Image (tube, rainbow, N blue to C red):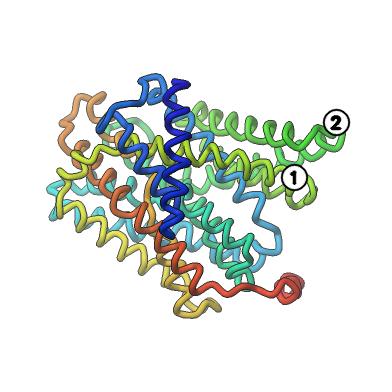
Amino acid sequence: MAVSIAEIIVLSLIADWLFRRFQLPGLLGMLLVGVCLGPHALNCLSPSFMGVGPDLRLIALVVILLRVGFELSRSTLHRVGGRILLLAFVPATCEGVIITLIGPALLGLTTMESAILGSVLAAVSPAVVVPLMIRFIKERKGAAKDIPAMVMAAASVDDIYVIVAHGIVLSLYVGLQGSLAWRMTGIPLSLILGAAVGLIVGSILCKLFDRFNPRATKRMLVVVAISVLLVRLQHQLAGSIPFAGLVAAMAIGFVILEKREHVAHEISAKLVKVWIFAEIILFSSVGAQVDVSVAWKAGLAGLAVIGIGLLARGAGVLLCLTRSPLDIRERLFVTISFSPKATVQAAIGGAPLLAMHAAGMETAPGEIILAVAVLSIIATAPTGAWAIAALGDRVLDVADPCATAELGQL
């Protein structure tokens, strides 16, 4: 496995440099490295690396969401908090519903199978969106209206919401026991409970850091480790207590930023360095999951489903931005920012197929769902990342720090 990691690091860094030289997002090169080295192409990666791939992607996702928490201040949430909630739920719901409706006609799935597909495709990829939004925040682009912070937070909650909804729809399809009302209620409960636990844990960590005053690197390791354990707790409580561990991780960063801003900045700086490695592992391992031949089977019908779903998502985004202070160009930027798909589709795209096989059901629908999920990664991750970077640099104005500070005091 060590050799596979070394190969991925070297080739990904080279690909990142080459793609940036051509004004393209470096993550595209990392994805391509994963596709080429993966089991569906050159098959150069060791089985042990592929086996720990999900765990490595989880750690990378935790790092992403922690960075979100450490960038979200209370003043920002006061200004755009309501809009964040709308953007987290409405666009994903619009996309999931429209795919549920068109799936039977275009792909020959049943309505329930189309709903499963919708729950797979409806997630936006924070792995693509968050790093780009953090770059815009550091450059103060769009800061006057908190556009990058709003997109970053909404995309992260959208991701968690869709994962929870997918579990509910899939469990209903394969006949797992449980009340539908309780499962539906579990979505907001899991988010609320996750936020509450994160706030408590973050407050405790602030006191422990004050008491023992560990170095910034150790603080960062403690925060990451506890966040991973909270996600593990989510899996252990599944089916009994609704709990979103990823929301808890975001809340930890938010609390530390609110209570100990200098500590938050120190930890955030360390996370930036960790992200260099985590980004390589995340995108290369996602690319390694991509089977181009499987995506090819989805064909034009699969592309049509993805495209119509994105149109519905875009309509949902524009609906959420009604009466917002954003101009037309900025609303287009937000809409484009909610288009890339990668991490969640790679993580759960094959789950329906495995669940159908385990339940002794016909697996053909699961194969179709997997094929369209893979196709969505190929079609939207590269183009979405490029479009966000290019459009953001053009339409987001650089904010005056003094004007932004005055706005935060209103």
- 231 vs 208, left or right, is left
Pointer 2 local density, CA inside 10 Å: few below 14, some 14–19, many at least 20: few
Q: Secondary structure at mark 2?
A: helix
Residue occupying image coordinates x 49% and y 63%: 86
Residue occupying image coordinates x 59% and y 68%: 141
- 90 vs 274, left or right, is left
Residue 210 % position (x, y): 85, 37
Q: Which residue is mark 2?
A: 212
Residue occupying image coordinates x 57% and y 75%: 397
Q: Vertically, is 31 above or below 226? A: below
Between 334 and 398, the one lying in front of the other is: 398
Between discs 1 and 2, the one toward the N terminus: 2
Q: Quadrant of residue 173?
A: top left
Label 1 is placed on what type of residue? Glu
Q: Is residue 200 visible?
A: yes
Residue 26 % position (x, y): 45, 50
Viewer-nearest of labels 1 and 2? Answer: 1
Q: Does the CB distance between marks 1 and 2 fall below 8 Å? A: no
Q: Vertically, is 58 above or below 115? A: above
- Disc number for residue 283: none
Q: Secondary structure at mark 1?
A: helix
Picture quarter with the C terminus: bottom right
Residue occupying image coordinates x 64% and y 68%: 79
- 368 vs 214, left or right, is left
Picture quarter with the N terminus: top left
Label 2 is placed on what type of residue? Phe
Q: Count numbered badges in the picture.
A: 2
Residue 96 % position (x, y): 32, 54
Q: Which residue is mark 1?
A: 266
CA separation in Å, label 1 and label 2:
16 Å
Pointer 1 local density, CA inside 10 Å: few below 14, some 14–19, many at least 20: some
